Amino acid sequence: MYNNLKVGYAVLHEYKVVIEVCSGCLTLEYYKEFKKKQGNDKNFNPNYDLIGLCKELVLDGLVSEVADYAQFMADNVNKITADRKVYVLAETANNHIYTKLFEKYQFMLPQEYHVCKSIEEIIKEIGRDIPVSLIKEIATELYKNPQYIY
């Protein structure tokens, strides 16, 4: 069931941004483990804004798990998350449901959370001159070969 799961990220230090991609079937428990590894990565910076790209992602879990995940993130402020903005491109109905649930718990975290309809909208909202082509190129590579790029 989970063999098509792909999760990876790239840190763009010059733009102070992390691009994170997820596709396939993802549980919040797996995502917590991913976030722990990300937080231990010496190249990761929790203060960098996050661009989350959810291509063909299905979140598999209970609504109650979203609260547990939010508490996990709150317990790891300054290691996994910090004072930053999160921009999520949600492409499916399942994504929209979970992103709306995540929004409900954002009061627990020192970050702003935005759901966007396109990469272009994300770039406009983020307010930095990041080439859309760069984000698309990195995302394509991460979807093909999930890894961590610096």
Image: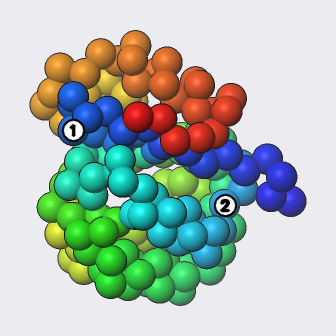
Closer to the observer: label 1 or label 2? 1
* Residue 115 seen in render: no
Residue sitting at x 30%, y 16%: 131
* Residue 35 placement (x, y as % from top left): 47, 64
On screen, 43 above or below 100?
Answer: above
User: Relative to 63, is 150 on the left or the right?
Assistant: left
Q: Residue at x 37, y 28 (%)?
A: 119
For residue 108, side relative to residue 21 (left or right): left
- Residue at numbered disc 1: 16
**Quarter of the view holding residue 28:** bottom right
First along the sequence among labels 1 and 2: 1
As helix, strand or loop, the secondary structure at mark 2 comes to: strand
Distance of label 1 from label 2 (alpha carbons): 26 Å
Give the position of the C terminus as an image quadrant.
top left
Q: Amino acid at mark 1?
A: Lys
- Position of the N terminus, as image quadrant, is bottom right
Residue 32 vertical placement versus 21 (above, below): below
Report how many numbered discs are placed on residues in the image.
Answer: 2
Task: Point out residue 56 in the picture as x, y percentages from the top left corner.
Answer: 65, 42
Q: Which residue is mark 2?
A: 26
Q: Residues within 10 Å of mark 2 (few under 14, many from 20)?
A: many
In-front residue for pair 105/72? 72
**Amino acid type for the residue under numbered disc 2:** Leu
Q: Residues within 10 Å of mark 1 (few under 14, many from 20)?
A: some
Quarter of the view holding residue 83? bottom left
Image coordinates for residue 140, horizontal then vertical, percent: 58, 24
Q: Which mark is residue 44?
A: none
Q: Is residue 29 visible?
A: yes
